[in-house]
């Protein structure tokens, strides 16, 4: 069967929206084209001068890698040329930048987990798209599209526009993302949990007991330390990914607008469940700042619900 390209799929998907004018389609394609170039540079990172740091610190207090700057600048340039985006907010920018034209707002983590590139560990681009509004700080429920590009053993773009989740694997021989994961659904259950247990001295007793219960029930631990890779594995294999709040990170570590909410949109669209703490859904949070943090527990519905009930 002829594989469907991302571009054809997005154009077909656009037909389901009678009011679509192709502007969101242009943004999704611009992100995909940028991802192809970012992926190419990552594949030869050890050979060209894009590893290492610039000497700067970003809003997440992470050392800025040269590949972060490259990815951020490429996405900004491509979306500017596309003329569909009014405002871009990025992990790599202290403040959002106004592009003037366009009806959309894009939040992005241009290269999440980039500290892992030196060790050849998968990293990813995360994006979250809203219609332009009075404020760029809209609840995650207002996202019109969200997704990621995972640069791993293969490069895969996974996105949703609110009616299902689909994955497209890059065929390097033709430079095209082809539909490889149609209508993705997260398994109802799973035997993998993913959390940084080095933080356990800061966890509350309930969380400690919950993680111990996963171990005694035979779950397996997998933690890559690269959110896109850990969330993608959770979507494919089921299980739990957690970056909960603790005594040190009282609001968690991950960023609401360009890490937690896009992943929450995807996981819910794939039939999973997401909470930030207790039973609160991060998608309902009213953001107060571009770089605010949020705890996140996401994954197979039954496992998230086990965590919720375990708290009682
Ligand atoms: P820790 C990478 O820096 C990142 O932002 C996410 O990709 C990842 O899930 C998390 O931080 C890892 O954080 O504290 O476990 O190293």
Image (spheres, rainbow, N blue to C red):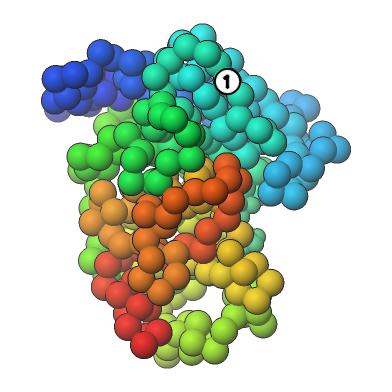
Question: Residue at (44%, 30%) from the top-left corner?
Answer: 134
Image location of residue 102, percent across then percent down: 43, 15
Instruction: Choose top left, top right, bottom left or bottom right for residue 189.
Output: bottom left
Instruction: Choose top left, top right, bottom left or bottom right for residue 275.
Output: bottom left
Question: Residue at (37%, 61%) from the top-left corner?
Answer: 281
Closer to the camera in the image, 230 or 43? 230
Question: Is 11 rendered above or below residue 304?
Answer: above
Left-right relation of 145 to 154: left
Question: Residue at (38%, 66%) from the top-left corner?
Answer: 280
* Residue 189 seen in the figure: yes
Question: Residue at (29%, 54%) from the top-left corner?
Answer: 268
Question: Is 117 rendered above or below residue 161?
Answer: below
The total of numbered circles placed on residues is 1
Which residue is most to the front?
A: 134
Image location of residue 21, percent across then percent down: 25, 13
Image location of residue 205, percent across then percent down: 54, 89
Q: Quadrant of ligand 1?
A: bottom right
Question: Is 280 rendered above or below residue 232?
Answer: below
Question: Is 237 rendered above or below residue 59?
Answer: below
Left-right relation of 180 to 227: left
Closer to the camera in the image, 156 or 140? 140
- Residue under circle 1? 98
Closer to the camera in the image, 175 or 36? 36
Left-right relation of 6 to 124: left
Badge 1: few (under 14), some or many (20 or more) residues near its Cα, within 10 Å?
some
Q: Quadrant of the N terminus?
A: top left
* Residue 173 seen in the figure: no
Q: Quadrant of the C terminus?
A: bottom left
Left-right relation of 58 to 171: right
Image location of residue 144, percent across then percent down: 32, 34
Element marked by disc 1: strand
Q: Is mark 1 within 8 Å of ligand 1?
A: no
């Amino acid at each position: 069967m002829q594989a469907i390209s991302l571009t054809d799929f997005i154009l077909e998907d656009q037909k389901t929206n009678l009011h679509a004018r192709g502007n969101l389609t242009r943004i999704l394609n611009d992100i995909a084209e940028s991802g192809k170039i970012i992926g190419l540079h990552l594949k030869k990172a050890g050979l060209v001068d894009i590893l290492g740091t610039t000497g700067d610190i970003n809003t997440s207090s992470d050392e800025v890698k040269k590949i972060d700057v490259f990815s951020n600048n490429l996405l900004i340039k491509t979306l500017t040329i596309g003329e569909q985006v009014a405002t871009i907010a990025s992990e790599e920018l202290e403040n959002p930048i106004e592009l003037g034209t366009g009806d959309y707002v894009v939040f992005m983590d241009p290269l999440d987990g980039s500290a892992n590139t030196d060790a050849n560990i998968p990293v990813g681009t995360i994006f979250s798209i809203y219609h332009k509004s009075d404020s760029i700080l809209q609840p995650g429920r207002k996202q019109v599209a969200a997704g990621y590009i995972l640069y791993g053993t293969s490069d895969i773009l996974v996105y949703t526009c609110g009616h299902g989740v689909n994955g497209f694997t890059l065929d390097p021989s033709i430079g095209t993302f082809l539909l490889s994961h149609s209508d993705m659904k997260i398994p109802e259950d799973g035997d993998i949990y993913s959390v940084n247990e080095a933080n356990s001295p800061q966890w509350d007793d309930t969380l400690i007991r919950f993680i111990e219960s996963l171990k005694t029930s035979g779950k397996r631990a997998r933690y890559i330390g690269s959110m896109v890779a850990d969330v993608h594995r959770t979507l494919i294999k089921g299980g739990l990914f957690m970056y909960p709040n603790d005594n040190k990170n009282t609001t968690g570590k991950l960023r609401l607008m360009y890490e937690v909410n896009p992943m929450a949109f995807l996981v819910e669209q794939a039939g999973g469940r997401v909470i930030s703490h207790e039973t609160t859904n991060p998608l309902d949070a009213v953001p107060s700042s571009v770089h605010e943090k949020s705890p996140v527990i996401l994954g197979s519905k039954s496992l998230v619900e086990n965590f919720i009930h375990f708290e009682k």
